[in-house]
């Protein structure tokens, strides 16, 4: 499995970071986790073949996590390519689809499908199984445990400021954890994650308090820790 961190910023775009979006490639298929702007343009720039992307998983409805969704859906609709969109709130399905059809009326007849995320296994195909774990960052927000090729990746999405909702049980199964790093202090991670058997931690969604004048401060943990940057690729 290959991960590409397309956007690694916190709630706003930063001078050298776009908003949250991670592409996971497994076999010939691509899956998108969060859809911050300008992910559609970034994928075009990378020469990505959009016919390989048929599933998008949104962690929560804060705009930095889905701001480019309409553009991406329009791009897929225009080419009549199937796209399944997993949204954390039921009301988001109608709102997103109404706006999409307002902006691009042919989308009414395009193969755009919506699913509302709830806890448990939400998706399974020949490559991946994805389990959603509720967090308390927003009224409905989810972490995703992604299982494929005998590896498990936990993507936390955003968390509460004290990370009391960090999905510890899912992290105990994971080889790699991708966590946000905006809302909590280093000390919270250092206390909470100390005994996890992780092989790698990648922080993304990097908040300004962690990155001053290009210098990053990361939590000190007993396993390898790194910070993602826009365009970073990582093989699991
Ligand atoms: Zn966010
Ligand atoms: Zn958020």
Image (tube, rainbow, N blue to C red):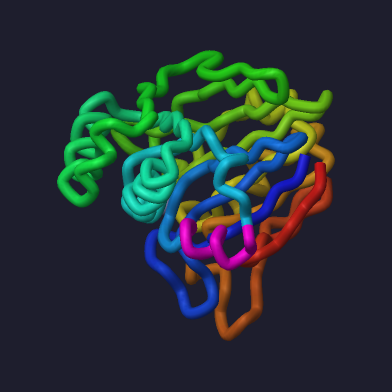
Position of 142 with respect to 178 (left or right) is left
Residue 152: x %, y % from top left: 74, 29
Residue ID at (67%, 36%): 29
Asked if 148 appears above or below 219 in the picture, the reply is above
Given residues 114 and 49, the one toward you in this image is 49
Position of 162 with respect to 210 (left or right) is left
Question: Which range is magenta?
Answer: 39-47
Residue 139: x %, y % from top left: 29, 32
Residue ID at (39%, 60%): 11
Asked if 222 appears above or below 207 in the picture, the reply is above
Quadrant, the N terminus: top right
Res. 67 image quadrant: bottom left
Residue 179: x %, y % from top left: 60, 46
Residue 195: in sight, yes or no?
Answer: no
Residue 42 covered by magenta stretch: yes
Residue 17: x %, y % from top left: 52, 70
Residue 128: in sight, yes or no?
Answer: yes
Residue ID at (65%, 34%): 154
Asked if 105 appears above or below 133 in the picture, the reply is below
Total numbered labels placed on residues in the image: 0
Residue 101 covered by magenta stretch: no
Q: Main secondary structure of the magenta part?
A: helix
Position of 138 with respect to 227 (left or right) is left
Residue ID at (61%, 47%): 23
Given residues 186 and 17, the one toward you in this image is 17
Quadrant, the C terminus: top right
């Amino acid at each position: 499995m290959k991960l590409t961190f397309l956007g690694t910023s916190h709630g706003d775009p930063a001078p050298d970071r776009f908003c949250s979006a991670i592409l996971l490639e497994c076999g010939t298929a691509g899956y998108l986790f969060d859809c911050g702007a300008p992910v559609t343009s970034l994928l075009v720039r990378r020469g990505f073949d959009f016919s390989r992307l048929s599933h998008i998983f949104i962690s929560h409805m804060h705009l930095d996590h889905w701001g480019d969704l309409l553009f991406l859906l329009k791009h897929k609709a225009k080419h009549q390519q199937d796209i399944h969109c997993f949204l954390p709130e039921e009301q988001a399905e109608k709102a997103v689809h109404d706006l999409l059809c307002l902006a691009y009326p042919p989308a009414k007849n395009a193969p755009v499908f919506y699913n509302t995320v709830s806890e448990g296994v939400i998706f399974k195909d020949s490559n991946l199984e994805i389990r959603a774990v509720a967090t308390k960052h927003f009224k409905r927000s989810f972490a995703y445990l992604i299982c494929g090729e005998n590896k498990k990746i936990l993507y936390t999405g955003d968390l509460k400021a004290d990370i009391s909702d960090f999905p510890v049980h899912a992290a105990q199964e994971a080889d790699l954890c991708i966590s946000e790093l905006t809302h909590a202090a280093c000390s919270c991670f250092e206390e909470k994650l100390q005994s996890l058997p992780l092989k790698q931690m990648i922080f993304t969604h990097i908040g300004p308090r962690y990155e001053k004048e290009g210098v990053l401060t990361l939590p000190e943990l007993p396993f390898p820790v790194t910070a993602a940057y826009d365009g970073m690729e990582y093989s699991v």
